[in-house]
Image: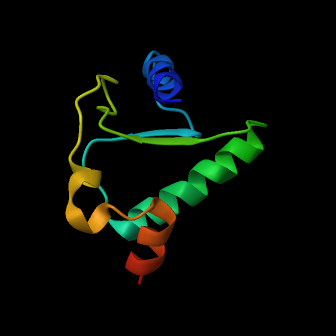
Amino acid sequence: MVGNIDILVQELCKLPKEVGWIEFKHSNCEPNMVGEDISALANSATLTDRDHAYMIWGVDDTTHEIIGTKVWQMEERRAELENWLRMSIV
């Protein structure tokens, strides 16, 4: 499965720019922003008849270069994304 994710990320990085159903992030993990972006991505995917939307950390949103991130390596971020959002959004 990890190999498939690697291939998917590489293919998405080849796109000339972000589109409504793809969001690249470097380190920004403010909970309210993440929740709002997930909602916007899901809406955009629905409106463009796509089965999936993607928020990918560790990719420069201008150059689409894979640069890595430490966002999910921080101890308080180790919970699954959904649980982390539930606990973090005010």
- Give the side of residue 15 with respect to residue 52, left or right: left
Residue at 32 percent of width and 32 percent of height? 59
- Give the side of residue 4 with respect to residue 43, left or right: left
The colour scheme used to paint the residues is rainbow
**Residue farthest front in this picture:** 1
Pinpoint residue 21: horizontal percent, then vertical percent: 59, 39
Q: Quadrant of residue 79?
A: bottom left
Pinpoint residue 73: horizontal percent, then vertical percent: 23, 52
Pinpoint residue 31: horizontal percent, then vertical percent: 37, 68
The C terminus - image quarter: bottom left
Q: Is residue 84 above or below residue 14?
A: below
- Front-most of 20 and 69? 69
Residue at 47 percent of width and 31 percent of height? 18
- Give the side of residue 37 with respect to residue 62, left or right: right
- Front-most of 25 and 9? 9
Residue at 59 percent of width and 59 percent of height? 39
Residue at 79 percent of width and 37 percent of height? 49
Count of marks placed on residues: 0
- Front-most of 79 and 87? 79
Pinpoint residue 83: horizontal percent, then vertical percent: 47, 71
**Residue farthest right in this picture:** 49
Q: Is residue 34 above or below residue 89?
A: above
